[in-house]
Amino acid sequence: MPTTPASPAATPGTRLTGNLGTGSIAFMVIAAAAPLTVIGGNAPLAIGQGNGAGAPVGFLIASIVLLLFSVGFVAMTPYVKEAGAFFSYVTMGIGSRLGMGTAYVALVAYTAIQAGIYGYMGWAVMDLVRFYGGPEIHWSVFAVGALLIVGLLGYRHIELSSKVLGIALVLELLVMMVVNVAVIANGGPEGRSLESFDPQVFLTAGIGVAVLFALTGFIGFESTAIYRDEARTPSRTIPRATYLAVGIIGVFYTLSVWVLVIAAGPGSVVAVAQETLFGSKNMLLDTAGQYAGSFMRDLMQILLITSLFACVLSFHNIVARYQFALARIGSLPAVLGRVHPEHRSPARSSFVQSLTAAVLVLIFVVIGLDPLVEVFGYMAGVATVGMVLMMLLTTIAVVVFFSRHPNLRRNPWTTLVLPSAAILALTAAAWLVLANFTMVTGGSVGVSTVLALIPPAALVVGVLVNRRDAGRTVELKLESVVQEEQPLS
């Protein structure tokens, strides 16, 4: 093997450490998906603009698509020793140039969704304060307050963030399950109807829209591999956490959306969802109040905010670790690849990410964008395109990798067949996203077109600015792993 410069990863003090188990990692990535927020926001969109009472099947289909993706992702995980998530997989399978392009897409997509959630959270807290008769305070004040807390937690060791996220996630899942049980026990105005799963109901023209909004609700689930250096036995922990995250999110979404249909009644659910979209009602909170009581409604309104906080903290940790991983291979300034001597965290990368988010929030305020419709809508659109693009490239990389290394193909179903099916499914998902993109952003065709082009532009920039030496160092390191590593049985 040719001699290459020493990898920064080998330098003392540049590797993160931790003892995160399967549950901790799964909780962090599920928190990034913000399940309670998705049920309150994406579900009414899927019902009101999609296939109505058949919307739960849209979430079920999205879960299956992401499960197909996870099969190849998990099969390749034992051979990927870099904690760079998607860009490490793409580098290993396709090459350093597309790998670096994928890294740039990740930075743009996750930074965008994080900034968008600051807008959403600022609006949500502002709305809550007004609801209880408080003073009129600009949304940016609450966004900056959240940003400071997130920055402090991100600066510390990952164990602290995992505990905060775990508590927030358990609370939001519990409160939604209480509402689910209450609705199912009551039966709703039309009884415990299974009409949602009738092919004549869900196989309508709007099913693609339902799948689209379901997919946007999964953003963040795929980030398990970014915590590789901080995981306990990562070759086992990362695959388990990935499957656990997809399973919990998929079941929770499908069940909870079905419950919303029961609560309103299949015949009336579209009208109720559209009233939510036009701002006269809140489908989720009204359901909680009607079936579980006013206390549960008030508690859920508060937990919607903690859900957003958990979400933005998760994405902050993800971006900080992407920057850290890129700094370790020399693609970003080396200072971002240093570990805090006490907290053993990517503290400097975390600080830079906090600064980036603060600048974006300031720009949004100066421009005068609406925090919910424009800040969150626009940034969620960018992140959705970026997520689907990264997943598609990663799945292609999996198929290429195992095609080049037939000795590692212990099970052709998990290494070639199902990943190939995932490529087809993700291609269809990309078409759905782009064909209905104005629904995601809420903006004009012109604005939506510009936003949709940002992730592909980031991919091109990453390919063009890829440093050959840094990319080659990673490729050779990964090649040595393939030669030395024995597949897990």
Image (cartoon, rainbow, N blue to C red):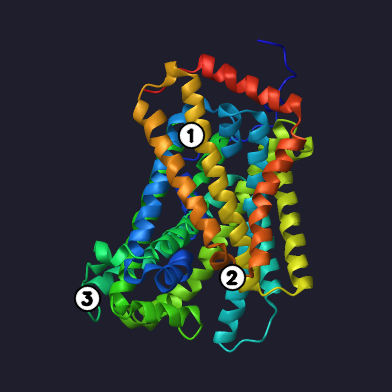
Q: Residues within 10 Å of mark 3 (few under 14, many from 20)?
A: some
Residue 331 x/y as whole percent: 74, 35
Q: Nearer the viewer, mark 2 or mark 3?
A: 2
Q: Nearer the viewer, residue 143 or 108?
A: 108
Residue 366 x/y as whole percent: 79, 72
Res 451 quadrant in image: bottom right
Q: Nearer the viewer, residue 281 or 195?
A: 195
Going by the numbered disc 1, the residue's amino acid type is Arg
Q: Residue at x 71, y 36 (%)?
A: 463
Res 372 quadrant in image: bottom right
**Distance from Cα at disc 2 to Cα at disc 3:** 34 Å
For residue 442, the mark is 2
Going by the numbered disc 2, the residue's amino acid type is Gly
Q: Earlier in the sequence, mark 2 or mark 3?
A: 3
**Distance from Cα at disc 1 to Cα at disc 2:** 42 Å
**Distance from Cα at disc 3 to Cα at disc 1:** 44 Å
Secondary element type, mark 3: loop
For residue 187, the mark is 3
Q: Are marks 1 and 2 in contact (CB under 8 Å)?
A: no
Q: Is residue 21 above or below residue 13?
A: below
Q: Residues within 10 Å of mark 2 (few under 14, many from 20)?
A: some
Q: Nearer the viewer, mark 3 or mark 1?
A: 3
Q: Is residue 282 visible?
A: no
Residue 239 x/y as whole percent: 43, 36
User: Which residue occupies the extreme bottom position in the image?
Assistant: 133
Query: What quarter of the picture does the C terminus occupy?
Result: top left
Residue at the spot of label 1 = 232
Going by the numbered disc 3, the residue's amino acid type is Gly
Judged left or right of residue 399, residue 122 is: right
Secondary element type, mark 2: loop
